[in-house]
Every structure is written in structure tokens, then in C-alpha cells.
Amino acid sequence: MTLQYARLFQLRAGIQLIAESGPMSKEELIEALRQRKTIDADETATEGADDIIEQLRDANLIKNSEEGYRLTSEEEFNDNRVVLTYSGEEVVGAEDQRAQADRILANIMYQHPMLLVLSKFIYRKGPVKDYEVMREFDGDAFIGDKMNQFTIDMGLNLLEDADVIEPVENGYIQERWPVRLFAHIIYKEYSDLIGDGGSVREPELFERLETLYGIPRSTFDNYITRLHTAGIVSEGSYKQLILNEDVLEGAKIHE
């Protein structure tokens, strides 16, 4: 499985079309995407629409049924017990387009955790040029996700679309924190801090993330609460944090 050539606004358009019309055949969905003019200048081409449909299916946002392509339901996701991901119905139910895009990206990051690695590198080292990202990761694999020039370029496009990274004159810099990136970094820094003591104090962990990644306290507190809800972290005594390794394994956020 590799990243498809589909941008975030195209994926959102596909989700919205099914939400508005109900289940659609592949032919109907392709034609509707063309009418939205979200593919490319050649409106007779099907490759763009095929990529959008395949990426939405790979991200478990749509599912092919007897009636046609439909949105996945929250019940289907609850049965899979996968955290920090969303059903197609939950994406449509988000309060605005920005929240919808965040939820789509969360599912793509689950299927393609290399996006976490690219994000972390830019957050830690930024500003970095795209050729520096290529030099660092070309040929690498993260949880079986192979990186090459195409997937890295597509990954940077998706992260830019979602305002996770921002292009500036001297390269990419960090912008908005996605929760999956936060969980990945928590695992990495928690593992480095834990040493022989068997626990990590929350103030110490925040200080490390603030120093290395420049995360504000409000974002840290908000996302720690979300990780509590997802079952990834729990509190011990004296402001200790405990990570649930089984949940981390299922979330595809650690190396």
C-alpha cells in the first residue's frame, strides 16, 4: 500500500458527495468528482478519481457495499477498537471543514505512519528544505511503510494541506499539531526519559517537549486529555504518567 495521488481537499469532496447522495457506484462517484472539478485539467481522465476512491477506502472512510460506496459507520470503528481514527460518518459530522480535514488526515496517518516521521523531523529540525527531507528518509521504512521520492512528496503535500507544516522561504516549519504526532512524540520522549525508574513525571515530560519541539502548555494539556480518553496514557501518583503499550501497538504510532 502506498500513498495515492490525492490531495486532502479532493478526499473531503469524495466524502461529502457520498454524504449528500447516499451510496454511489464507482462510476457515479467518478462522474460526480469530475463535476466538482477537483481532479485535474483533463476532465476525461479517471486516474485522479480512482486515486481519491482508493485512498478513502484504504483509510477506512468509505466501504463498497451491495448498494455502492458508502461511508463507514462509528459502530464499525468501535468494533475494530482502533484509537485516534474516525469513521466516514464521524468525518462528515465534524463541526467544520478544518475538523473534517483533521479527521481524514488522522486515518491516513494510521495507514501511513511515515507521515508521523516526516512531521517529527520538520518539527524538531525546521526549517528544512524538501531536499533535506528526501536526503534524510529516501529508502527508509517505518512500520513497513517504504519511503521514496513519490511518497515523500505526497506526504509533504498532505501535511501542508492539513496545515501540519507550513512552507516558508527557507523550508518547512511546524504549524498545527495533529494528535497522532503528539502521541508518537510522547512515546519517543517517554521511552528516553523512563530510564531505570519505571515512570515519568508529567512536568518533566512537558519540559522536554517544550524544549525540543516548542509545544505550548495549552496544546500539551489538551492532547494529554485526549490520550487519556483514548486509553493511551493514565495517571499515577505524584503526577506520574503511564503509557499503555498494548494500545500504542494498535495505534501504529511507535517505532
Image: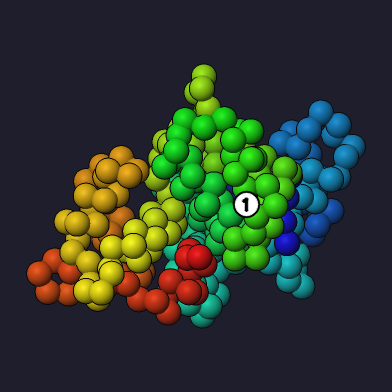
At a point 53% along the width and 27% down the height, the residue shown is 171
Colour scheme: rainbow
The residue furthest top is 169
At a point 28% along the width and 63% down the height, the residue shown is 193
Q: Is residue 136 in sight in this rendering? A: yes
- Quadrant of the image containing the N terminus: bottom right
Residue 35 in the image, given as x and y percentages of width and height: 76, 37
The residue furthest right is 44
Q: Is residue 96 left or right of residue 23?
A: left
Q: Is residue 62 in sight in this rendering? A: no
The residue furthest front is 196
Which of these two is toward me, 135 or 36?
135
- Taking 50 as reference, is 83 above or below it? below
Residue 4 in the image, given as x and y percentages of width and height: 73, 50
At a point 26% along the width and 51% down the height, the residue shown is 208
Residue 230 in the image, given as x and y percentages of width and height: 36, 69
Q: Is residue 47 left or right of residue 102?
A: right
Q: Is residue 23 left or right of residue 196?
A: right
Residue 50 in the image, given as x and y percentages of width and height: 80, 51
Which of these two is toward me, 194 or 1?
194
Q: Residue type at mark 1: give it.
A: Ile
Residue of label 1: 15
- Taking 191 as reference, is 207 above or below it? above
Task: Determine crowd level at label 1: few under 14, some 14-19, many 20+ residues with C-alpha closer than 10 A.
Answer: many
The quadrant where residue 96 appears: top left
- Taking 160 as reference, is 19 above or below it? below
Q: Secondary structure at mark 1?
A: helix
Which of these two is toward me, 194 or 9?
194
Count of labels shown? Answer: 1
The quadrant where residue 45 appears: top right
